[in-house]
Amino acid sequence: MRLALFDLDNTLLAGDSDYEWGQFLVDRGVLERADYEAQNRAFYEQYKAGVLDIHEFLGFALRPLADHAPEALEAWHRQFMKERIAPMMLPAARALVRRHLDQGDLCAIITSTNSFVTRPIAHAFGIEHLIATEPEKRDGRFTGRVAGLPSFREGKVRRLDDWLAGLGRRFADFGESACYSDSHNDLPLLERVSRPVAVDPDETLAQEAERRGWERISLR
């Protein structure tokens, strides 16, 4: 069996689900535009530049989950899927995922965006397994804090190993492994697999892919 790992934002999606979730809540009036929008943009620019403090960002991004009842969050997310996510689900990305699934590969989306936002997106792509940053819950409500290690940069590699261990497997069990990503933030994970694929890559990843002779594709 082969292993296929997919980054989500700006890889399988033509956009960033974490950023769009915040903007969706702003547009609905759930969050104050003046307070939230500028911070959301600033964190997104830090991510793209490779200087994001993931814990500072998560303190910001997970706060809306703690401030609202689960029933309201679920209802908003259903609308979010229709309005923001469905238009970003690239047909070529759907086809790529389907090819791996049809080949019997073990497939997972591995993303730094939290699992509340991303689990329904993984299901929409037909992918059972999701490795994402986990928001903490207590007594059925989100706390605004992170549970465990964020799935970000080197943390993705550690979370991958933990996920495989939970399945009774090790990374070494797979003779072939592929990872698809757009971001230089995923270099630790791309370096781990036997087939790193730069997907519509940012400038830094494009340069690294060229230097290392990695495969480069577009799903746009």
Image (tube, rainbow, N blue to C red):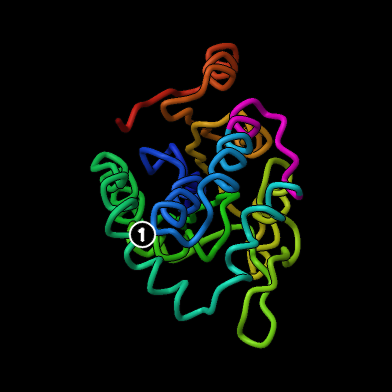
Residues in magenta? 45-55
Q: In which quarter of the image is residue 91?
A: top left
Q: Is the residue marked by circle 1 packed among few (<14), some (14-19), or many (20+) residues within 10 Å?
A: some
Q: Helix, strand, or loop for circle 1? A: helix
Q: In which quarter of the image is residue 139?
A: bottom right
For the residue pair 182 and 46, the one nearer the viewer reads as 46
Q: Mark 1 points at which residue?
A: 80
Report the residue at 62% width, 54% height from top: 61
Report the residue at 65% width, 70% height from top: 166
- Eyeballing the image, is 171 above or below 130? above
Find the residue positioned furthest to the bottom.
Answer: 139
Please tell me whether the stretch drawn in magenta is mainly helix, strand or loop: helix
The x, y position of residue 93, in whole percent, is: 31, 42
Tell me the amino acid under the disc marked 1. Answer: Phe
The x, y position of residue 46, in whole percent, is: 65, 31
For the residue pair 119 and 68, the one nearer the viewer reads as 68
